Amino acid sequence: MQKGQITKALSGFYYVTDRSNTIYQTRARGVFRKQKITPLVGDYVEFESGNQDEGVIQKLLERKNELTRPQVANVDIGIIIMSAADPKFSNQLLDRFLIMLESKHIKPIIFITKMDLLDHDETIKIKKYQKDYNKIGYQMVLIEKTDKEKKKQLEILFNEQFKNNLIVFMGQSGAGKSTLLNVLNPELELKTGETSQSLGRGKHTTRHVELVPLLESLIADTPGFSLLAFDEIEPESLSEYFPEMWRLRSDCKFSGCLHLTEPGCAVKKAILEGEIPEYRYDNYQLFLEEIKKRKPKYRRKGES
């Protein structure tokens, strides 16, 4: 049985790359549908193929994680692309992405693009965010202005930190995900789009998920989106994905503290003392309320 990794999924076909970097066009076994198994880009698989155009995936190997939006499996690093302007930077949206990655045990890196569009005061504000997120433990990188500067900056990061990883590029539509990949390798010629003036967000230019070999890593260029729901997170576990809150959990008076109105809450104390940014706590409260209001999922008889 041959083994490989799915590096592209398009129109019902799965393109599997083996160890020799040969690409096979395959389909999934019919039984997968009955078993409600969906192969994802990034999956390691066993497959059979008489030629490169007519393969069949026989088995999916165990995943270490998976994302649903975008649909990618076995991710090592999630690079969140946020723009400083056009569209406007949103700490709430950034925190949604961070929670999604934290909940899947994927290392987050934050890239901020379009810094050249800011005036002095706006630049200071973004740098304050950078200081806050770095203090929490996240790496926030302010992307350089010119293509030449961007290329040098990104090559250093990839060579020093990102080798031999499966990396997902995600974030706001119109924030410049495909643009950054094109800077690293112009031969990719990935489509880019301007920001929609009527909607205030970027036009979707990437239509499918594909792993792109780049600087000894595999990069997933994915469709941009701006809505993230917390379908798999329970109220009691939300604070796990806010590292600065999770570190204080043992200092709270009550176990299972939700950091709302409970007496002796170490998180509330840290906010009052300026150790935790208020906007992070505001986002925590907003997300917690969303989770509490989430409609319960009901299963039909016989479903596991």
Image (cartoon, rainbow, N blue to C red):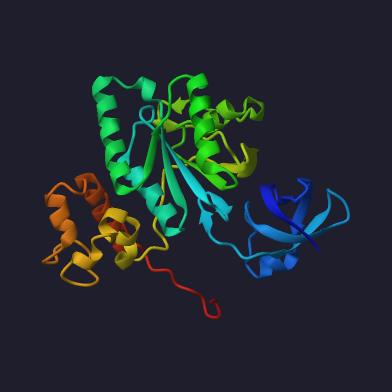
Q: In the image as oriented, which residue stretches furthest toward the front? A: 160
Q: In the image as oriented, which residue stretches furthest toward the right? A: 50
Residue at the spot x=49%, y=25% of the render? 150
Name the spot of residue 167 as percent of width and height, x first: 54, 45
Name the spot of residue 217 as percent of width and height, x first: 61, 42
Q: In the image as oriented, which residue stretches furthest toward the bottom? A: 302
Residue in the foreground of this view, choosing between 90 and 269: 269
Residue at the spot x=17%, y=61% of the render? 266
All told, the count of numbered labels is 0
Residue at the spot x=13%, y=56% of the render? 269
Q: In which quarter of the image is residue 302?
A: bottom right
Looking at the image, residue 66 sits to the left or right of residue 117; the answer is right
In the displayed structure, would residue 4 be above or below residue 62? above
Q: In which quarter of the image is residue 47?
A: bottom right
Name the spot of residue 61 as percent of width and height, x first: 66, 64
Looking at the image, residue 170 sits to the left or right of residue 141; the answer is right
Residue at the spot x=41%, y=50% of the render? 228
In the displayed structure, would residue 258 be above or below residue 55? below
Looking at the image, residue 31 sits to the left or right of residue 295; the answer is right
Residue in the foreground of this view, choosing between 202 and 58: 58
Name the spot of residue 174 as percent of width and height, x first: 46, 31
Residue in the foreground of this view, choosing between 117 and 208: 117
Report the quarter where the N terminus lies: bottom right
In the displayed structure, would residue 97 be above or below residue 142? below
In the displayed structure, would residue 76 be above or below residue 293? above
